Amino acid sequence: MIDLTIHVALEKLKKGEISATELTRAHLDRIEKLGGDLNAYITTTPERALADAAAADARYKNGTARALEGIPIGMKDLFATRGIRTTAASHMLENFVPEYESTVSQKFIDSGSVLLGKTNLDEFAMGTFSKTSYFGAPVNPWQIERKLTAGGSSGGSTSAVAGGLAMGATGTDTGGSIRFPSAITGLVGMKPTYGLCSRWGCVAFASSLDTPGPIARTVDDAALLLSVMAGHDEKDSTSESAGFNAHTPLESILGDGKKLRIGVIRELNDVAISDDMKKLFNARIADLKSLGAEIVEVSIPNILDALAAYYIIAPAEASSNLARYDGMRYGLRVEGSDLIDTYKKTRAAGFGTEVQRRMIVGTAVLSSESYEVYFMQAARVRRMIADSFNAAFEQCDLIICPTSSGTAMPLDSDLSPLEYYALDMFTVAMNLAGIPACSVPAGLAGNGLPLGLQVVGKRFDDLRVLQLAKHIEQFAGVDNRPTKIMGK
Ligand code: GLN
């Protein structure tokens, strides 16, 4: 049952071939068996899951089943869940139990899904290997004995979905945190258009970049999850009025004489990528051409400056967003000799090294001496990148590019902060531009590990992004069934 896609499971639930309770128990058993090795969850909610499942079974009986009725999912532990602790993988929020429900998690409740638990991540979603988690890093289910990273920051979600510890999960993507972890675990991860999914009740990292989105094993499943997550929310002032209603399975946008212009970014030719990535990229381009796609070269002149701009803007916003953790209202409090001392002791004890580094950098670039040279300059680069993407989409319908240069690395790789930041090379530009991008399996590298390609579209072209991703998924044919990946 673990290997079923969401679409197939829904069919079986509708026909009464399986029950939501059986499906949920199968996932809870797997969490029990493998949860310790994978460290995918920070908090599991088995009682809630079984109650959700029983309610779902009742709805199948009385004919009121909803879009995800009875589907067991994982929720990134950045989304506030009422009555269930929400930690952001930080010591600061280790014992924080929200009294409210985030909009995204509420939408999952309203769609009838079953909550298995809260998935692990980098502390406050800052990181690339999920190693900054206060609860230890999640592990990649592929070649598990090698202890590879499941990516970050949504690494608990990808570990859970790839390992069969959830049928789908939520992620958030500020600079690549849905796409990179999905790529290196053989999954589909969609960063939607900024504003399509509400950020309300999601612990803030960099508000102008933070984008909730789905992680699943197939493009059709990701599209279904996104249909549930998306929609205007008056509680989030940057939420857009557009919704997303995919009729799944998704229709094809290639073949049968349909013309599609696919852009490849000239400047990315200069970026070093692994031979495997090069090979798979070229193979998938050839496949798409065989269906009649036209390949056009486009230029995003400042794309190589995206990393620098991102690592100014994101820390700047983080330093402001994380000012609220002061030990006064909620979260950790370490008593000091006076008010200032209490702030200092609380923040020194509550935040890990990477989060502290970001706040120091962020505060520095916002200081009066640096604001114009760093922050405003980064804001201008951001504008130029967004404008170049708009211009590129006059010449092509969609763009494809790698999600990462190589496959999953060992968790004990000794990388400097700058080396970690450089891994976001292919993902941050889309956040700066606010445009949709989906990572989809492109094939397996010579070492047997998965690699991903991104499909990128203009704002609100999320549906076409997923449609093209589906073609790539079909050509790649990566078998990502959890029992296949894990050999059990
Ligand atoms: N790796 C990036 C960072 O550390 C992206 C994180 C994210 O998207 N949340 O900032």
Image (cartoon, rainbow, N blue to C red):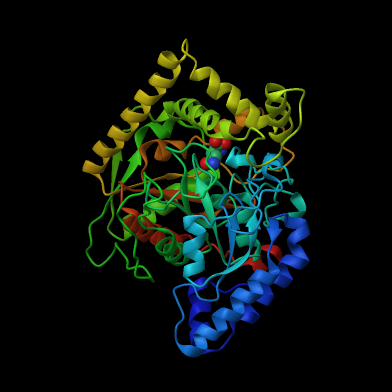
- 404 left or right of 380? right
Q: Position of residue 78 (x, y in %)?
A: 58, 49
Q: Of 272 and 286, which appears nearest the observer?
A: 272
Is residue 388 at all visible to an observer of this figure?
yes
Using the image, determine if residue 297 lies above or below residue 147.
Answer: above
Q: Residue 394 placed where, x, y %?
A: 21, 42
Q: In the rendered image, which quarter is residue 481 located in?
A: bottom right
Name the foreground residue: 318 vs 471. 318
Left of 475 or right of it: where is 185? right
Give the residue at the far front of this rendering.
338
- Determine the image quadrant of residue 169: bottom right
Q: Quadrant of the C terminus?
A: bottom right
Query: In the image shown, does 244 or 410 lie closer to the viewer?
Result: 244
| Mark count | 0
Relative to 244, say whether 392 is above or below: above
Residue visible at 61% across and 38% down in the picture: 127
Q: In this orientation, does residue 488 appear?
A: no
Above or below, comparing residue 387 to residue 361 in the picture: below
Q: Nearer the viewer, residue 477 or 275?
A: 477
- Quadrant of ligand 1: it is top right
Q: Position of residue 355 (x, y in %)?
A: 63, 32
- Identify the image quadrant of the N terminus: bottom right
As drawn, which residue projects farthest toward the top? 369
Q: Residue at x 48, y 60 (%)?
A: 476
- Residue 318: x and y in percent read 53, 32
Residue displayed at 44% across by 60% down: 229
